Amino acid sequence: KNQVEQSPQSLIILEGKNCTLQCNYTVSPFSNLRWYKQDTGRGPVSLTIMTFSENTKSNGRYTATLDADTKQSSLHITASQLSDSASYICVVSASSGYALNFGKGTSLLVTP
Amino acid sequence: GAVVSQHPSRVICKSGTSVKIECRSLDFQATTMFWYRQFPKQSLMLMATSNEGSKATYEQGVEKDKFLINHASLTLSTLTVTSAHPEDSSFYICSAPKLLSSYNEQFFGPGTRLTVL
C-alpha cells in the first residue's frame, strides 16, 4: 500500500477560482513533506517543503499546510491560472537521507 | 535554484538497440543521483541510486544488467537501456540532491521520453 495518498485524483476548475489538494501519509518517522508541480512531459519542480515544526508555507499563490499529528497536508492554490494546469505531487521523506515516498499526484486542469 | 539537465529530451529507437541517457548537475556536485521511471498518469518510480565511485543500487524488480548506470563524475550520471523493448518505453527522470540549510532538496531533470518501436 502506498504510504502517500493524494486526493482528488483529478480536478477541473475555472480560471480564477481557488482549489485545495490533499495529501495523507503514513510514512514514519517523518522528516519533511514536499509539494512538486509537474507539467506534462517535464520533470517535477519544487513548490514547498515543510519539516515537522512547520505547519504552513507559502510560495506565491501556493500555500501548503501540514498537520504532523494527523499526518495530513494540503496545497491551496489561489486565483488559479491556466498555467497552473499540471500534476501536483506530494512527496514525503522518512529520514534526513534521500529516501522519498511519492504520491500518485493530483491532475489539475484549469479551464478558461 | 540548482539545475539538473538531461539529454536527450526524447529518443526513438528500434527494438533491440541500446539507448544512453545523460543526467548532469549543472551548478553543483552530486555524489548521488537517482533515476526514476514514470508511466502515463502514474507517479515516479525509483529505479536505482547512482553513486559516484561505486556501484549503483537498484530497486527490487529492476534488472541491473538491462539498466546500466555509470556515475562518471560528480556532475554526470548515465543510464543505458540495453536491448530496449517496447515495454521499456517510458518517461525517464533523474534527480540530484543538494544540501540546503538542514535538508537535502531534490532537483529533478526535465526528463527523457523514450519510445521503443
Image: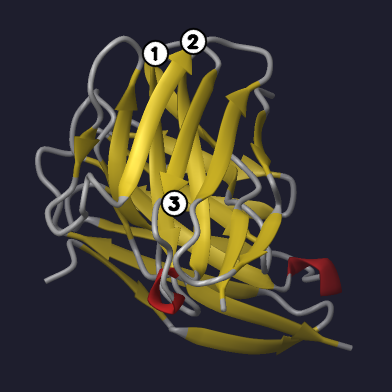
The x and y percentages for residue B36 are 40, 51
Q: Residue furthest front?
A: B16
Looking at the image, residue B7 lies above or below residue B102: below
Q: Are marks 2 and 1 on the same chain?
A: yes
Looking at the image, residue B52 lies above or below residue B81: above
Q: Rounded to the nearest whole Å, what is the CA distance between mark 2 and mark 3?
A: 35 Å
The x and y percentages for residue B108 are 55, 40
Residue that label 2 marks:
B74
The x and y percentages for residue B16 are 44, 66
Is residue B107 among the parts visible in the rendering? Answer: yes
Q: Residue at x 69, y 83 (%)?
A: A109
Residue that label 3 marks:
A65
Q: Residue at x 69, y 24 (%)?
A: B1
Q: Amino acid at mark 1?
A: Thr
Q: Rounded to the nearest whole Å, what is the CA distance between mark 3 and mark 1?
A: 32 Å
The chain carrying label 3 is: A
Looking at the image, residue A90 lies above or below residue A7: above
The x and y percentages for residue A101 are 27, 51
Q: Amino acid at mark 2?
A: Leu
Determine which quarter of the picture holds residue B39. bottom left
- Label 2 element class: loop
Location of the N terminus of chain A (image quadrant): bottom left
The chain carrying label 2 is: B
Q: Rounded to the nearest whole Å, what is the CA distance between mark 2 and mark 1?
A: 5 Å
Q: Residue at x 69, y 74 (%)?
A: A18
Work out whether mark 2 precedes mark 1 in sequence or the reverse, and give the earlier one.
1
For the residues labelled 2 and 1, say whether their Cβ atoms are less than 8 Å apart: yes
**Which numbered circle lies on residue B77?**
none
**Which numbered circle lies on residue B31?**
1
The chain carrying label 1 is: B
